[in-house]
Amino acid sequence: MVNQKNKAKSGIPPKSDFNDWYPFIVEASGMIDKRYPIKGMDVWRPFGWKTMKLIDSHTHKEMEDTNHGECNFPLLIPEDLLEKENRLVSLLKRAREQGVNPEDLRNDEEEAGFKKEVYWVKHAGENKLDIPMFLRPTSETAMYTMFPLWIRSHADLPLKIYQIVNTFRYETKQTRSFIRVREIHFFEAHTAHVDEEDATKQINEDLEIVSRLMEKFALPTIISRRPTWDTFPGAWYTIAIDVIMPNGRTLQVASVHHYRDQWAKAFNIRYENIEGGQSYVHQTTYGMSERLLGAIIGVHGDDSGLVLPPDVSPFQIVLIPIISKDNSEIIMNKINDISNKLRSVGLRTHLDERKIRPGQKYYDWELKGIPLRLDFGGRDLKANTIMCTTRLGDKEIISLDNLEDKVIEIIEDFKQKLIINSKIKNEKAIIRLPSLEHSSGKWKLTDEISANKVYWAPFEGNDSDAEIVEKMTSLTFLGESLEELSNEMECCITGKLTKKKVFLAKTY
Amino acid sequence: MVNQKNKAKSGIPPKSDFNDWYPFIVEASGMIDKRYPIKGMDVWRPFGWKTMKLIDSHTHKEMEDTNHGECNFPLLIPEDLLEKENRLVSLLKRAREQGVNPEDLRNDEEEAGFKKEVYWVKHAGENKLDIPMFLRPTSETAMYTMFPLWIRSHADLPLKIYQIVNTFRYETKQTRSFIRVREIHFFEAHTAHVDEEDATKQINEDLEIVSRLMEKFALPTIISRRPTWDTFPGAWYTIAIDVIMPNGRTLQVASVHHYRDQWAKAFNIRYENIEGGQSYVHQTTYGMSERLLGAIIGVHGDDSGLVLPPDVSPFQIVLIPIISKDNSEIIMNKINDISNKLRSVGLRTHLDERKIRPGQKYYDWELKGIPLRLDFGGRDLKANTIMCTTRLGDKEIISLDNLEDKVIEIIEDFKQKLIINSKIKNEKAIIRLPSLEHSSGKWKLTDEISANKVYWAPFEGNDSDAEIVEKMTSLTFLGESLEELSNEMECCITGKLTKKKVFLAKTY
C-alpha cells in the first residue's frame, strides 16, 4: 500500500527516527505551522484545529453527561490573587520537606509556585499598571477567588465546572509541538464537595472519563499515583495518566488532583453544613491538553504519515474519483451521491475533486492519516462497487448496496485494530526493571537498561531508596500503579516482599 | 403571565430604565459574574457561555458552508510585527487627511494604530523580554505575517480562514458586559483574493451571512457604509451592521472591511498570476463579537428578564412537574418520557426537578428567558395533555399526541413573533432628521432631536457639512445606507436633490 516513489520524494523521515519524524509530520500533514515568529507558539491550521476540536468534542460530551457546567474565566490574573496561592504552595512544600504540620508554618511567607513560569502584563497602552497581572498558567487562583461567592450552603454542592481555554507557560526547555508549548490549548475541570469522601468519588468519576476518552483515541495508558516529591504541592495526591511514545519516553496527557480542603482554607471557601455550622469544601481538579493530540500522532503514525482514529479525524472517509475523458460527468455525479449517502448516516466525508493524479491524492491523504479511502471509477460504475482501502492497508471491493452499513463496519474494525495494535506495542514497551545489588559499598544493576522501554518494578522503599533507583537507572519514577501485583514480590532495592508496583521511565 | 409578587421581591428594574435594567439582568440571569477583580473582564457562567456558544455554532455553520477553514493563531504578537501595520495605518491616515496619494508618503514613519490600546507583555518569569509582545486586539498582523508563506500562486486563492478567540483592548471608557469589555470573545474571518472584484464578491457573501445570522437572532439591523473619517485607516471601505438598543443608542455588532491590496503591499503578500507575473492579493475581513449577545439581550428582554430566541437559548423548553403527595412518581416518569420524546427530535429540554414551589421555578425561567415552559400535573395526566406557556405570554393546552410537531410549530411561531416585534420596534425607532436652516450666520434645527431615536436623512454634502450636522444634532453619522432612496429628496443641509440616505444616532 505504501507508495515508495512518493515517499522518497517527500523525504518523510522513517518513524523509527521518531525525534525527526514527529516535528516533520506535524507540519507536513498541515496540522500546524511552526514559522510563527515566537518559539513555542504555533499556528493551528484548519486540519490540526479540526482534529483538536473533535478531541474536545468528546471531552465536552463527557462533561455534559457528568453535569459539569462550562465556564469561561478571564485570561488575566492580578498578582495579588497569586499571593494566596503562593503562600499555600510554599507552605505545603516546606511542610512536606520538613515533615511537619502545615498549620505550624502558616505565618511564614516565601516566594514560590508559578511566579517564575508566567508571562507578565505590567503595561497597558502607555500606562504602567498599578497591579501587575499574569497570563493564567492554570485557573485555580482565578476560580477559587469566585468560589466563595457561589458556594453558600450544602445545597450549592457539589459545584462542578470546567473550561477549555488557552493557558500560558514561559517554558525555558526546548519546545515541541503539542508536547511542550508556551501557549497551551488546555482543559481544566474544577469541583468542590462537602467532604473528602465526595471529592474522592469525583476522582473516580474522572478516571472513568479518562478511560472512555482513551478508548476513543485508541491510546493505552499508564495510570499511577505520582510520588509525593513529584506531586503538585497544592495537592493531597495526584493521579497521572501517561502515554508511551515510540521513543520510549512517557508523555503525561492527563492528571487528576485531590486537594482535600487545603485550597479551601487558603481561599476561605466554606459552606453552611446540614447542622448549620461552617465547613470547608474539599476540591479536585482534572486537567488535559493538546498533548492528547501529540500522543495520538506519536502512537498511531507510521512511515507514510499520520494515522487518525475515526473519532477524531476531520473526515473519516476521503472519496477519490477515477475518471477518464468520457466518463467524468457520470462518475462525479455518482460519487457525489455516494458521499451524500454516507453523510446522511453521520459519517464525515471529503470528496477530493482536485485536478491532479490519483497517486498524488493517495499520498496526501495517507500523510494526513484519513482512516478510509474510497476509489470510484468506470469499472466500479459497471459493477456497482467501490474500492475501499484503509489507512492500515486493508483493501476490499465492496458493493454499493448496503454501502453505509459496510463502511460503518469497516470503520469499527479499523478502530478495534488501532486499539489492539497500540495495546500490543504498549505491552511490549513495558518490561520489568532489573534488580539492584549492593556489594562493596556500591549499588549495581543486575542487567542493562534499554532505551525505548518503560519499566515496572515491585517497590517497597523510602524516598532515598527511590533516589538510588533513579540514579542507577537514569529513569524517573512515574508513580505507583493503582493496581496491586497479584502476588507478593521482592522490592527491587530493599528485597522486602510487597504487592506495590511502580513504573519508571524517561519522561517528556 | 408576569408574576408581580416575585417581580417586586426581585427588584428587577423596569426595562424602560434600560441603563439600570441591562447591567442587572446580565448578572441576575446567571449569564456572567462581574465580581472578578479586573474591571471589564467578567466570568462567563455556564448559562451565558452556553448561549454564546450557540451563537457561535451558527457562525461556524455559515463558515463551513462557505468554505472558510478554522484556524487558531497565537495570542501574542511581537512588537516588531506591529511596526509594519503601524506604518501602513499611519500612512493611510495621513494620506487621507492630506488628500494625497499614500505612495507619496511611503517613507515617512509615525507611531499610530493600536499601540495605545493594547496590553503589553514585556516580562516572563524573572526575565525582561528582548522583544516586547502584546495581546492581540485583532489578528491582521499575526495572520498577514503567515499569508506570504501560504500563498504562492493563484491556485492558492481565494484563501478563506477564520477564528473565534479571545482578544484584548485596554479600554479606558466605562465598560459594560458584552458591549465594551477588555477581554473580548471575538470572531474574525480573513480572506485573500486574486483581485479587487473577487474581494468585493466576498464582501457580498459576508453580508448575506450577516443577514442569515441576524434572522436567527431575530435582530433587525442598520447596514451602512461608514463615513471615510470613521473607517479603519487600513480599509478601503467598511460596512457596519448596527443594532438599535432600547435606549436609542446603536451598537455595532458586525463589520466587514474591504482592504484592496493595501495590507498586501505592507506585508508583501503576492502570488504568481496566470500570466506568470507577480500580483498583490486583495483582502477582506469580517468581524463579530460577544456584542451579538448584548444585542439579543437588549432587543428582546422585558420587565421579567431575558427573552432568548430559540436558536440560541441553552434550552428551548423547560419542563415543570406539578406534583402532589400521591402522584409524584407517575408524574415524574411521564414528564421524563415527554422530555426524552422532545429531545429525540433535536429539541433542547431541561426538566426542573428542584424541590421548590412551581411559582419560584416560573420566575427563574422567565428571568433566564427560556422560550417555552411545559407544566405537567395530575389533571394533564388524566386528560393526556400538557400546559404550554411561551415566554411571550401565550398559553395553550396541547395534546400529548403529536406533541413534538406541535411544540416545533409553537417554537416557530415564537421565532416569527420575536422577528416581527423587533422589526416593529426598529421601524418606530428610526425617524427622519429635521432639516437644518441657516439664518443670521447660525445653523438652526427645524425641530427637536428626541432621545431614544435613530435618524435618517437625505444627505449630499461634504465632510464639513457632516460636521455641522453632527454638532447641531449631537448625533454621530453611522454611514450611508446601501439602499438608495426611491425618489430624490433634498439634502438635510445643502438642500441639493439626492437619493443618498444616511443614518445618524447616538452610538455605544
Image (spheres, coloured by chain):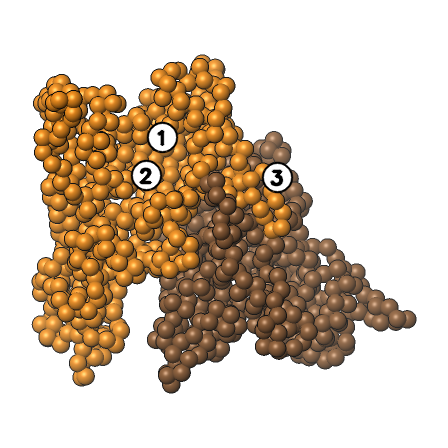
Chain colours: A brown, B orange
B353 left or right of A429 in image = left
Q: Residues within 10 Å of mark 3 (few under 14, many from 20)?
A: few
Q: Do the residues at discs 2 and 3 belong to one chain?
A: yes
Residue found at the very far bottom of the displayed protein: A275
CA gap, disc 1 to disc 3? 30 Å
Q: Nearer the viewer, residue A69 or B398?
A: A69
Please state which of the two labelled residues, at mark 2 or mark 3, is closer to the viewer. 3
> Where does the image place residue A471, in percent across and percent down from the top left?
77, 63
Of label 2 and label 1, which has the lower sequence position? 2
Q: Which residue is mark 1?
A: B232
Marks 1 and 3 on same chain: yes
Task: Locate residue B461, reporting x and y percent.
Answer: 20, 21
Count neighbours of disc 1 (C-alpha within 10 A) and say few if under 14, some if 14 to 19, many if 20 or more. Answer: some
Q: Amino acid at mark 1?
A: Phe
Quarter assignment of residue B138: top left
Q: Are marks 2 and 1 on the same chain?
A: yes
